Amino acid sequence: MINICARAVLLPGLLALVVCSCTSGVNRNQTSVKVGVYYFDGWAGQNRNASNPDEIWAKDAPSHLTRRMVEEFPEREPVWVGGMISQSIMEKQIDLAADNGIEFFLFCWYWRDNNGPINPEAIQNLYLHTSMNLYLKAKNKDRIKFCLLVANHGGSEIKGSGNWEKATQFWMQYFKDPQYIKIDNKPLVVILIRKELKKMIWPECRMFQKAGITGFIHCRVWKY
């Protein structure tokens, strides 16, 4: 039997998820610990103020750069030139993470359309998935594994058991990737979820069995 424990911790310059797994009946000294980091793609996409002539700073800025970051912290320059994500920058980030003991990225994943049926094209083209898509194409991605952090909050909520099943079917393409992090052959999925949702409805395991997967492990992270 595999027991999972996940804890979010603050480390210098990053938010990390420490995932511990241990097998019943095995000496606790043999417990394996893996450290992963949340990856929010705030440095992709166009800033909402980019076309505003009164906001010159935003012309070539990524989506989540703010006036405050520019004006109140002018001495803080992005490590990556321009602050925008690209294939070469993603590969540098993989090397930097792997060289410093990070074993996996938890890429934020967003449902489309909010509170509605699945929209695969919108999901695939969403700018917030840019870095994950670049990771999947990276020539050095074998240095670090990945998994999904499902951002099931306002603007990206999955409603109804049918949509949860559609979401899981969509995730199968990631689960089949050899770099997707698994525990006892079960893919790890982390879900950001509202407190008032007392239970999740998951699809039957037949789709997993067909893909040679014994099921999947999910960790809930309460938003509020």
Image: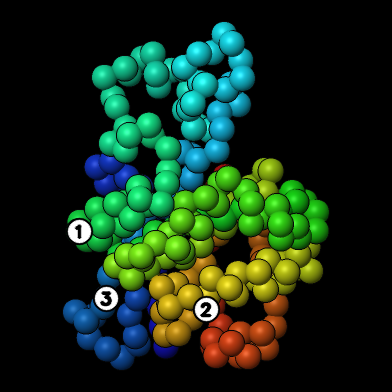
Residue 173 vertical position relative to residue 156 in the rendered view, above or below: below
Q: Where residue 57 is drawn, which disc sits there?
A: none
Image coordinates for residue 120, horizontal then vertical, percent: 71, 60
Q: Where residue 99 is drawn, which disc sits there?
A: 1
Image coordinates for residue 156, horizontal then vertical, percent: 67, 49
The part of the image, by quadrant, that contains residue 211 is bottom right
Please state which amino acid type lies under the numbered disc 1.
Asp
Give the distance between the C-alpha atoms of the residues marked 2 and 3, in whole angstroms: 23 Å
Q: Are marks 1 and 2 in contact (CB under 8 Å)?
A: no
Tell me the mark number nearer the camera, choosing from 1 and 3.
1
Image coordinates for residue 192, horizontal then vertical, percent: 56, 54
Compare residues 188 and 193 and report the one nearer the observer.
188
Residue 147 vertical position relative to residue 72 in the rendered view, above or below: below
Image coordinates for residue 205, horizontal then vertical, percent: 65, 85
Mark 2 nearby-residue class (10 Å; few <14, some 14–19, many ≥20): some
Residue at mark 2: 176
Give the distance between the C-alpha atoms of the residues marked 1 and 3, in whole angstroms: 19 Å
Give the distance between the C-alpha atoms of the residues marked 1 and 2, in whole angstroms: 25 Å
Q: How many numbered discs sit on the rendered protein?
A: 3
Quarter of the image with the C terminus is top right
The part of the image, by quadrant, that contains residue 109 is bottom right
Q: Secondary structure at mark 1?
A: helix
Q: Residue at x 26, y 78 (%)?
A: 31
